[in-house]
Amino acid sequence: MKRLLEEFRKLKDYRKNQVAYTNPSEILFLSLLAVMSGANSFEDMSLWMKERKREIAKFLEKPFKAPAYTTIRNTFLNMDSKEIEKLQREWVEGLSENSEGLTIVATDGKTMRGSKSKEMNQKARHIVSLFLTDSKLVLTQNQVEDKSNEIPALIALLDNLNLKNCVITMDAMHTQKKH
């Protein structure tokens, strides 16, 4: 967990001369732990941190005051999602590089349940993911553009990765000759 926290600390701090007990990278890291423990909202994340402030202070090796849910929300709103995704992808790639032998990477496309809205004239969102089967971690994902399909989205994902010693599994639709 310390290694993952160190990766999170590489994120750019968006704050301007603000004093806070917890920096944005630590808030994101602790929010991830809270979600993994069942938190479903910013309020849940804040409560989770308050309930574990002693353990968190010991882990961070400094005094800890749990942020308010509005601080957590603002942290998520102000962080660059592309930067977070890049950091996460590099961390997961590092995990796969440490494993011996071949790494199995599965590809899969899923339509996001509840993402369609007739009132807002919004089609359901479709995501293509690359998944490391041994560690059960999502390596990366990409949204399928409107009026497109999984093929170009998957090609874009694979073009941006440095995969070595991998076996990639995918649906039959991806076996077209021109790809």
Image (spheres, helix red, strand yellow):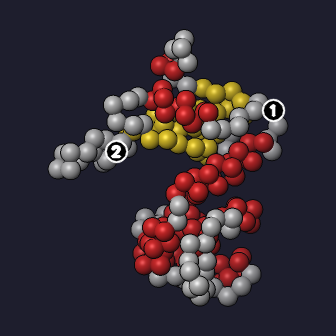
The N terminus - image quarter = bottom right
Quick one: 112 or 85, which is closer to the camera?
85
Which residue is at a point 44% across and 72% down the rendered structure image?
A: 73
Measured in 3D between alpha carbons, the distance from the residue under mark 2 to the one under mark 1, in whole angstroms, is 36 Å
Residue 21 visible to the viewer: yes
Residue found farthest to the top: 177
Q: Is mark 2 on a helix, strand or loop?
A: loop
> Residue 39: x, y in percent?
47, 66
13 sits left or right of 172 in the view: right
Q: Mark 1 points at which residue?
A: 101
Above-or-below relation of 151 to 160: above
The C terminus - image quarter = top right
Which residue is at a point 64% across and 48% down the rendered structure image?
A: 89
> Residue 167: x, y in percent?
69, 27
72 sits left or right of 26 in the view: left
Residue 45 visible to the viewer: no
Residue found farthest to the front: 16
Badge 2: few (under 14), some or many (20 or more) residues near its Cα, within 10 Å?
A: few
Which residue is at a point 57% across and 85% down the rendered structure image?
A: 18
Above-or-below relation of 99 to 24: above
Amino acid type of the residue tagged 2 in the rendering: Arg
> Residue 38: x, y in percent?
49, 63
Quick one: 21 or 63, which is closer to the camera?
21
> Residue 7: x, y in percent?
70, 61
- Sequence-wise, which precedes: disc 2 or disc 1? 1
Q: Is mark 1 on a helix, strand or loop?
A: loop
Q: Name the residue under label 2.
A: 113
Which residue is at a point 54% across and 14% down the rendered structure image?
A: 178
Badge 1: few (under 14), some or many (20 or more) residues near its Cα, within 10 Å?
A: few
Residue found farthest to the left: 119
Amino acid type of the residue tagged 1 in the rendering: Gly
80 sits left or right of 132 in the view: left
